[in-house]
Image (spheres, rainbow, N blue to C red):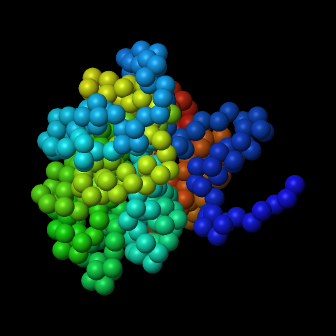
């Protein structure tokens, strides 16, 4: 069979983090070992029944069997706007400041194509979701990494960014609650970030997929759009995936600055044909009636968090209890590397962890646990690691 040369933008990509984890997991499973995966952030909790029932009823409507609008059903965009108003106190124009996404990953990946030209600079706080630098590179942009460290509470040091980089930066990717570090950002950080972005004309891309996975009502995460002036410079990406256990449904939204939302829409109208309308109508049901189910999921993840943090503490593994997300960001034992420790655990115990350096060089020395298995299996996984 003829082998064709890949484009440079693809040929130079490192292995996608989670694809590589799947490969290693398959190798160990083939040896007959019982696998417990704490690797990928995919909720094990099922999609609530009322959402599935909404999909079933909507899927039977012949009008939903045709091409959908690439911007999304107006009913879905109105539901998004209503949800933002209720949850964050942020008013949005559903016709001009909301666009539907085939999952937030799709939207984030396409956004640089609308606003980054070859040679433009993107500031990316790292460790980070791998899509940010990859999408920047696909658009021909240059990524500058801003290290997130425990000493700075895993927030980028805005004062350490040079004036030249601020002036050159077209885009700044920010993600709180953060994947993978599970850190949260205070209002003061967002206020400084928005102020600087407005001064320099930098676009703020806020990935807010985990705002609903919080554990203390007094510490509910913010939307960047709550900050005065943010609408001048910011677009926020959100998803139904984690909030309502809908990762496989592929539905999300981008909201905020009208020109940024419409710019992303221009890309989408040329590369996709929107979300199946029945899924969007199920999304309306989720946004309208899903809060009790989200609250129930939070209680389950909180219990798992507390169990895991206590067990890790007994092992001597440093890991603070996060205020949000279903991740734990932990230091590897002294003298080990991220990849070496994770590989040793997998080969000897069948427990899948995620190496911190897979999220960028600043993640070296850490590993991530996803609290996406039941308490019994989580306890078993932690017992295996403790024995090792």
| Up-down relation of residue 299 to residue 190 (above or below) | above
Q: Which x, y percent locates residue 302?
A: 34, 34
Q: Is residue 194 left or right of residue 253?
A: left
Q: Position of residue 286 (x, y in %)?
A: 33, 26
Which residue occupies 54% across, 44% down? 39
Q: At 41% from the left edge and 42% from the top edge, which residue is drawn?
A: 70
Q: Could you say which is closer to the camera, residue 367 or residue 60? A: 60
Q: Nearer the viewer, residue 271 or 41?
A: 271
- Viewer-proximal residue among 223 and 353: 223
Specify whether 32 is left or right of 171.
right
* Quadrant of the image occupied by residue 303: top left
Left or right: residue 124 versus residue 386 is left
Residue at screen point 54% across, 30% down: 377
Q: In terms of image quadrants, where is residue 341?
A: bottom right
- Work out which quarter of the rendered image holds the N terminus and state it: bottom right
Task: List x then y, in percent, for residue 106.
Answer: 46, 49
Q: Relative to 6, does residue 274 appear above or below in the rendering?
A: above
Give the mark count: 0
Q: Could one spot residue 323 in this view of the protein? A: no
Q: Residue at x 15, y 43 (%)?
A: 91
In the drawing, does residue 122 fall left or right of residue 152? right
Picture quadrant of residue 204: bottom left
Of residues 191 and 55, the one nearer the viewer is 55
Inspect this view and state whether residue 173 appears.
yes
């Amino acid at each position: 069979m003829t082998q064709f040369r890949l484009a440079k933008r693809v040929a130079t990509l490192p292995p996608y983090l989670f694809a590589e984890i799947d490969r290693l997991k398959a190798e160990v499973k083939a040896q007959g070992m019982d696998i417990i995966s704490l690797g990928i952030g995919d909720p094990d909790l099922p999609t609530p029944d009322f959402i599935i029932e909404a999909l079933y009823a909507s899927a039977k409507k012949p009008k939903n069997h045709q091409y959908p609008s690439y911007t999304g059903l107006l009913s879905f965009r109105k539901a998004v706007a209503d949800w933002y108003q209720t949850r964050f106190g942020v008013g949005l124009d559903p016709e001009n400041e909301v666009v539907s996404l085939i999952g937030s990953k799709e939207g984030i990946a396409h956004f640089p194509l609308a606003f980054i030209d070859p040679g433009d600079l993107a500031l990316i706080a790292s460790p980070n979701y791998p899509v940010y630098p990859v999408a920047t590179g696909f658009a021909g942009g240059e990524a500058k990494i801003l290290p997130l460290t425990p000493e700075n509470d895993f927030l980028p040091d805005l004062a350490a960014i040079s004036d030249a980089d601020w002036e050159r930066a077209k885009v700044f990717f920010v993600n709180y609650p953060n994947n993978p570090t599970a850190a949260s950002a205070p209002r003061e950080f967002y206020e400084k970030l928005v102020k600087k972005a407005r001064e320099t004309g930098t676009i703020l891309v806020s990935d807010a997929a985990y705002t609903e996975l919080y554990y203390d009502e007094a510490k509910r995460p913010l939307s960047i759009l709550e900050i005065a002036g943010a609408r001048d410079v910011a677009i926020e990406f959100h998803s139904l995936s984690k909030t309502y256990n809908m990762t496989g449904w592929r539905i999300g939204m981008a909201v905020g600055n009208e020109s940024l939302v419409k710019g992303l829409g221009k890309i989408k109208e040329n590369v996709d044909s929107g979300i199946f309308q029945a899924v969007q109508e199920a999304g309306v049901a989720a946004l309208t009636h899903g809060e009790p189910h989200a609250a129930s999921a939070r209680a389950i993840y909180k219990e798992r968090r507390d169990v895991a943090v206590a067990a890790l503490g007994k092992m001597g593994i440093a890991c603070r209890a996060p205020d949000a997300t279903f991740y734990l960001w932990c230091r590897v034992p002294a003298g080990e590397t991220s990849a070496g420790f994770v590989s040793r655990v997998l080969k000897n115990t069948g427990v899948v962890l995620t190496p911190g350096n897979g999220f960028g060089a600043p993640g070296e020395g850490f590993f991530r646990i996803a609290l996406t298995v039941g308490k019994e299996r989580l306890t078993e996984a932690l017992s295996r690691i403790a024995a090792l």
